[in-house]
């Protein structure tokens, strides 16, 4: 059994849905858990369930978008250390971009992204002190494209970008950062669909506990897998990558020439080149411009090629 005895975890948005399941799963395995949620009654109910089951947890009701460092303070004040942050809190506010008030757009961004940044900034030195700090960032398939959810998609894409670089910086200081794209039956999704088969598939095969199993594995001090972007829903998970299709070359690179290449540029291909880090894409693009640069790149660490 992956045991978390002695470790302290923050789970944001842990009053219901996936966050609740993550908090309960980590606590059942011995972690002391900060159950953060703006809905106090829900956070209290989760803490009660954990303590009734013999676990250790405390309530924190700070709003992630404004109280990131205070949430970290709750962990330090109660337990004197911090090992794991599951940045799970997120909100979805639907509205077409041209119609959604900007305040609402930024509210989505502030909860999902800015709040996570501020909490992690306060948490970082303590995660380093932990010696095996773990961060799980919760992104979403919304980053791909979902009409009516531009703020949500942008904030979740921002988390993906944040996680990629924090994973590399974390490697230097012993903190493992991983970003997930989950799908689960939660209060967020149970009203999002009307089709009965979609609803029953979500409810019966994609409960939040499946995602909890995955993040619990990632959060464990002996797990070495990290830094990638994983989709997880039900009992299946997969690694997601950003990939480049074969490049299209223009003779003179004029605006007119790109008109002629439009079909090639927008067509699909199975010939994909995976870009894991900035240096991968940079090196690939350099070589496309000048194959001779390959020798110069060979001596360099891909991590040093980041823009
Ligand atoms: N459910 C899915 O299939 C799905 C898919 C992709 C991504 N996600 C992401 O997973 C995470 C959890 O999703 P869920 O479905 O369990 O959501 P949910 O809406 O059921 O639960 C989110 C919890 O976060 C809390 N919360 C909201 N704003 C907060 C704030 N400012 N500070 C602290 N807590 C706050 C809410 O009170 C709620 O308890 C979210 O980030 C969501 O975007 C969910």
Image (cartoon, helix red, strand yellow):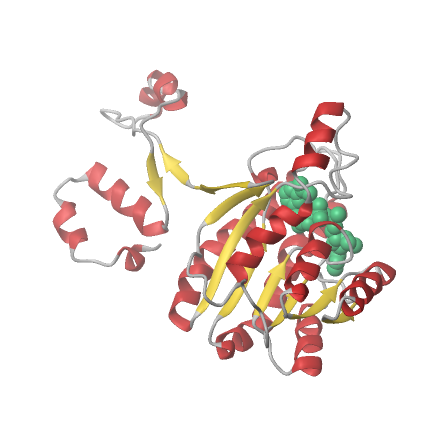
View extreme (front): residue: 1
The quarter of the displayed image where residue 286 is located: top left
Q: Is residue 242 above or below residue 228?
A: above
Nearer to the camera, 251 or 23: 23
Q: Is 142 positioned to the left or the right of 96 in the image?
A: left
Tell me where residue 181 sits by quadrant: top right
Is residue 219 in view? yes
Q: How many marks?
A: 0
Residue 89 in view of the camera? no
Quadrant placement of the N terminus: bottom right
**Could you say where residue 137 lies in the image, as x and y percent from the top left?**
57, 55
Task: Judge from the rendering whether residue 188 lies leftward or rightward of residue 282; answer left or right.
Answer: right
Q: Position of residue 51 (x, y in %)?
A: 78, 70
Image vertical order of residue 32 relative to residue 290, above or below = below
Residue at image location 73% in from the left, 38% down from the top? 189
Q: Nearer the viewer, residue 297 or 191?
A: 191
The residue lying furthest to the right in this view is 41
| Residue drawn where x is 21% and y is 38% of the image | 289
Give x and y (percent) for residue 94.
Answer: 74, 37
* Left or right: residue 273 compared with residue 66: left
> Residue 55's x, y, as percent?
72, 70
Residue 100 position (above or below residue 82): above
The one nearer the camera, 162 or 53, is: 53
| The C terminus sits in image quarter | bottom left
**Residue at horizontal 51 percent and vertical 58 percent from the top:** 218
């Amino acid at each position: 059994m992956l045991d978390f005895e002695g470790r302290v975890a923050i789970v944001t948005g842990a009053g219901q849905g996936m966050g609740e399941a993550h908090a309960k799963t980590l606590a059942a395995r011995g972690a002391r858990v900060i159950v953060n949620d703006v809905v106090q009654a829900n956070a209290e109910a989760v803490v009660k369930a954990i303590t009734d089951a013999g676990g250790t947890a405390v309530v924190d009701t700070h709003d992630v978008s404004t109280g990131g460092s205070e949430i970290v303070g709750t962990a330090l004040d109660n337990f004197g250390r911090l090992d794991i942050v599951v940045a799970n809190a997120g909100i979805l506010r639907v509205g077409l971009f041209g119609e959604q008030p900007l305040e609402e757009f930024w509210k989505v961004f502030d909860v999902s992204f800015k709040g996570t940044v501020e909490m992690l900034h306060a948490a970082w030195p303590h995660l380093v002190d932990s010696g095996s700090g773990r961060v799980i960032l919760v992104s979403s398939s919304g980053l791909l494209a979902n009409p009516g959810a531009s703020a949500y998609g942008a904030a979740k894409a921002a988390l993906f970008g944040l996680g990629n670089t924090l994973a590399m910086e974390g490697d230097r200081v012993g903190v493992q950062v991983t970003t997930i794209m989950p799908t689960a039956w939660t209060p967020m999704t149970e009203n999002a669909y009307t089709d009965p088969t979609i609803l029953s598939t979500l409810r019966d095969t994609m409960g939040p506990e499946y995602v909890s199993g995955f993040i619990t594995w990632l959060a464990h001090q002996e797990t070495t897998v990290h830094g990638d972007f994983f989709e997880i829903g039900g009992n299946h998970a997969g690694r997601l990558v950003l990939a480049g299709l074969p490049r299209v070359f223009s003779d003179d690179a004029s605006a007119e020439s790109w008109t002629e290449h439009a079909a090639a540029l927008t067509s699909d291909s199975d010939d994909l080149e995976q870009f894991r880090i900035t240096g991968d894409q940079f090196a690939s693009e350099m070589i496309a411009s000048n194959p001779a640069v390959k020798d110069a790149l060979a001596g360099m660490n891909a991590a040093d090629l980041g823009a």
